[in-house]
Amino acid sequence: MPGQQTASKTEKEPVEIKLAHSPDSDDAFMFYALATHKLSTPGYKYTHILSDIQSLNEAALTETYDVTAISFAAYPTVRDRYILLDCGASFGEGYGPIVVSMKSLKPQELAGRHIAVPGLKTSAYLALKLYESNFEPVVMPFDKIIDGVQNNLVDAGLVIHEGQLFYPERGLHRVIDLGIWWQEQTGLPLPLGGNAVRRALGPEIGRQIAKTIRDSVTYGLEHREEALNYAMQFAREMDTELADKFVGMYVNKWTLGYGEKGQQAVKELIERGTKAGLLPEPPTVEFLSEE
């Protein structure tokens, strides 16, 4: 049919959106609905790229991905190219990255020590530098830090992701929980990572992406069991019960939207980092508004 042929020729190809995030159970839970096509995304085709957060922070420097998970500590270096979405973030509310050691150490004994860290652009590293500036960082892949501490390659290790829950099983001691310290200092949750979209895409597409991410998070929270079952393939060394606890720590109300308090927390972290000379000036943060 001539009419049908014309329609097929003029039908627009979907816009590909390269979406990068970490291969972790919390991110898998968050993007379950989108990755398994539970959501309708007319006009857009999402391609998922999985990589560790340090690599994603570095990739953002060259705008490798349209949407990327990013450490809040890395955002100031790419704020001219990316804008933060007001959803999809991870906050630690009274918990967060933990410094662990083989032998029991007091927090004040970290000064001058060699400490394994998951990357120099991570929010965990920034928080540790704000707590104790005098230490020697040893960069390791985040999933090798516990092994590094156990094998005495370093004096202590800064643990993120699931390691925050299972380090006691490996015979390690907690030196300090930076989420607790941050809350005591500020009364705010500790901002760890968010999602940012390329400014070049424009605000209209950015808002559509934000809606899709928020819808995916909502679907996961409303279909927790099936989303958790999907996320288990990324749950390193965790059983279902522990994975459920971990997901609950980092996929929650803060992930659906920062709110005023969440935005304040991000601004506070970046302002403190800038004042300490750890982040580039100016200490400005910009979130893509919903309208």
Image (cartoon, helix red, strand yellow):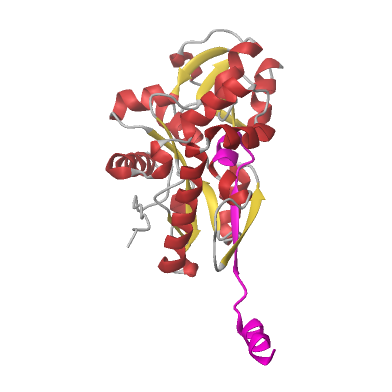
Q: Do we see residue 263 in this rendering?
A: no
Q: Residue furthest front?
A: 1
Query: Which residue is depicted at the point 68% across and 28% down?
Result: 144
Q: Position of residue 12 (x, y in %)?
A: 59, 78
Tell me the magenta residue range. 1-29
Along the horizontal axis of the image, is 184 left or right of 7? left
Q: State the residue in front, 6 or 67.
A: 6
Q: Do we see residue 90 in this rendering?
A: yes
**Image-quadrant location for residue 163:** top right
Q: State the residue in front, 198 or 14.
A: 14
Q: Position of residue 178 (x, y in %)?
A: 43, 25
Q: Position of residue 234 (x, y in %)?
A: 66, 34
In the depicted structure, whether residue 84 falls above or below residue 257: below
Query: Which residue is depicted at the point 61% across and 54% down?
Result: 59
Query: Which residue is depicted at the point 59% across and 55% down?
Result: 19
In the depicted structure, whether residue 233 falls above or below residue 163: below
Q: If the image is split into quadrants, where does the N terminus sit?
A: bottom right
In the depicted structure, whether residue 216 falls above or below residue 96: below
Q: Is residue 5 magenta?
A: yes
Q: Residue furthest top?
A: 104
Query: Which residue is depicted at the point 41% across and 66% down?
Result: 203
In the depicted structure, whether residue 81 falls above or below residue 131: below
Q: Position of residue 155 (x, y in %)?
A: 60, 18
Along the horizontal axis of the image, is 70 left or right of 253? right
Q: If the image is split into quadrants, where does the C terminus sit?
A: bottom left
